Image (spheres, helix red, strand yellow):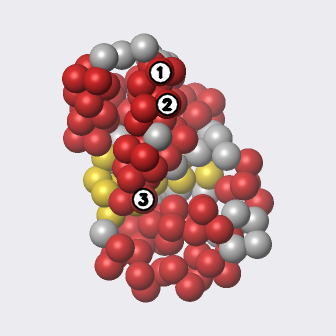
Amino acid sequence: RGSMKSLVVDTNRIIAALVKDSVSRMILTAFLCTFFTVGFSKQEIIKHKEELLEKTLLTEPAFDALLGTLYNRITILSDKALQPHLEEARHIMEAVDPDDVEFIAASLAIRCDGIWSDDKHFQKQSRVKVWTTEALLRELFAEKD
């Protein structure tokens, strides 16, 4: 029986879980994983709230409740925790996608099982393991047996 996964979640997976009752939502709410993200991810979501509300067709209270549910499952790492790892993370990701630097720093900070992301940029580095939604789902179901 596999041990509980501890993963850094990229913003797009959280958005995918918000937008529809999807595999991403199921992974975030139904599996015994420990999820982490960076503060920047929640700010991004709040910044695009209007647009996301249109996509989800949820009322604002329902959207806020769902966002709350998802973030109850995700620990937001402090900037202070990321700080010591930012330089290495920049070195790894800057040329590929500067927006991804904090997620790499987060995964280095907590020594977790990797980053959950379908963003191809993360695949361009080999320092941190990257789980696509599909690979993560296969792994999680394999552990249930």
Horizontal and vertical percent for residue 12? 54, 41
Residue 27 visible, this orientation: no
Q: Residue furthest front?
A: 50
Q: Which residue is mark 1?
A: 54
Q: Is residue 117 left or right of residue 28?
A: right
Please give the name of the residue rendered at 41% of the width and 36% of the height, measured from the top-left corner. 49
Please give the name of the residue rendered at 58% of the width and 76% of the height, measured from the top-left corner. 89
Q: Quadrant of residue 60?
A: top left
Is the Cβ of the residue at disc 3 closer than 8 Å to that at disc 1?
Answer: no
Residue 74 visible, this orientation: yes
Between the C-alphas of marks 3 and 2, the distance is: 18 Å
Is the Cβ of the residue at disc 1 closer than 8 Å to that at disc 2?
Answer: yes
Q: Which residue is mark 3?
A: 40
Question: Of label 3 and label 2, which has the lower sequence position?
Answer: 3
- Residue 139 is marked as none
Horizontal and vertical percent for residue 16? 51, 30
> Which quadrant of the figure contains the C terminus?
top left
Horizontal and vertical percent for residue 5? 41, 47
Q: Amino acid at mark 3?
A: Phe
Horizontal and vertical percent for residue 37? 40, 55
Q: Which residue is mark 2?
A: 51
